[in-house]
Image (spheres, rainbow, N blue to C red):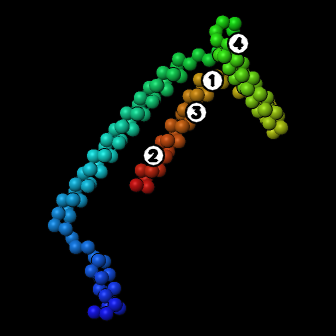
Amino acid sequence: MSADEFDPFVERLFSRTPPMADAALFTAGVEARLQKGSRFRSLAIVLAGVVGGVVAVRETVSVNVNLEGQPEGVVAGQALGQGVQSASIGIQTAIDSALSGLGLNQMELGSVGGMQVFWLAAAGIIALATISVVRLSQEV
């Protein structure tokens, strides 16, 4: 056999793998493992979501942000509160100047409290997640 005939002969031998006797059993075992893993994974994700949601609700209900510097307490806490307060004043001033540049400086958003903004943002995120899940289920 010459070198020109040997290479195509070897390629033909290894181009097709012979079927194994237990190929169907192997495929069924792999699919069962994949299904078992996805069930465990989805259960873990749901459990983590529930725990995270409970912690988030508990923390948002018990939030007590005091930005006024009171004499008692830790000095670092007071400095942090004053820093946050000055940063929020700076941001508010920047937003006011940007809105006045656009002619929207008469817009009143001061009546909306922090918790209302949180729940509006949470509702928006839930709506986006729902839309994403619907689109994903339509593609699959």
Q: CA distance from mark 2 to mark 1?
A: 29 Å
- The residue closer to the viewer here, 83 or 105, is 83
Q: Is residue 96 above or below residue 30?
A: above
> Which residue is labeled 4 in the image?
69
Q: Earlier in the sequence, mark 2 or mark 1?
A: 1
Amino acid carrying mark 1 in the image: Gly
Q: Is residue 110 above or below residue 27?
A: above
Disc 3 crowd, CA 10 A, few/some/many (<14, 14-19, 20+): few
Is disc 2 in contact with disc 1, using a CB cutoff of under 8 Å? Answer: no
x then y, percent, for residue 39: 31, 43
Q: Is residue 4 left or right of residue 133?
A: left
- The residue closer to the viewer here, 58 or 14, is 14
Mark 3 secondary-structure assignment: helix
- Location of residue 4 by image quarter: bottom left
Amino acid carrying mark 2 in the image: Val
> Which residue is labeled 2 in the image?
133
Q: Earlier in the sequence, mark 1 or mark 4?
A: 4
Is disc 2 in contact with disc 4, using a CB cutoff of under 8 Å? Answer: no
Q: Is residue 104 visible?
A: no
Residue at the (34%, 85%) spot, across then down:
7
Q: CA distance from mark 1 to mark 4?
A: 20 Å
Mark 4 secondary-structure assignment: loop
> Which residue is labeled 1 in the image?
114
- The residue closer to the viewer here, 88 or 138, is 88
Amino acid carrying mark 4 in the image: Gly
Q: Is residue 114 above or below residue 68?
A: below
On residue 121, the disc is 3
Mark 1 secondary-structure assignment: helix
